[in-house]
Image (cartoon, rainbow, N blue to C red):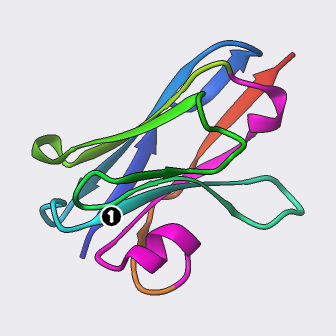
Amino acid sequence: QVQLAESGGGSAQSGGSLRLSCRASGDTVDRYCMGWFRQVPGRERELVAVIDKDGYKVYDDSVKGRFRISRDNAQATFYLQMNNLKSDDTAMYFCAASTAITMCTTGRGSGYWGPGTQVTVSS
């Protein structure tokens, strides 16, 4: 059983930066992929970025060039560096981890979720 806990959310001005962290406990993470998702009320959860167990990364077009996903297996922690933030980035951000890449890219299937951290960007 893996527990995930996000941190690093908060408020930022448009153009500013935040770094989200997702700390895993309960298992080593080297065989897990991890995805960052976000959701605003009334809309479906959407994938922001995913990193697989080998470090291959995929980003949603809306964050390419601004966000960077990374992992530190020794610290069992995944990161999402968010630069040049926009008001459209305002959402609740969730991390998800799984040994199945489809779960990390779709949010569906067997895996683990953190409780989420709120990001609010003001213009």
For the residue pair 12 and 68, the one nearer the viewer reads as 68
Percent coordinates x, y for residue 119 in the rendering: 67, 34
Residue 3 vs 79, above or below: the answer is below
Residue 75 as seen in the image, left or right of residue 97: left
Q: Quadrant of residue 15?
A: top right
Q: Is residue 104 magenta?
A: yes
Q: Amino acid at mark 1?
A: Cys
For the residue pair 29 and 113, the one nearer the viewer reads as 29
* Residue shown at the point (87%, 16%) measured from the top left: 123
Label 1: element kind: strand
Range drawn in magenta: 85-108
Residue 111 as seen in the image, left or right of residue 99: right
Percent coordinates x, y for residue 30 in the rendering: 15, 60
Percent coordinates x, y for residue 87 in the rendering: 83, 28
Q: Quadrant of residue 27?
A: bottom left
Q: Circle 1 is placed at which residue position? A: 33
For the residue pair 107 and 40, the one nearer the viewer reads as 107
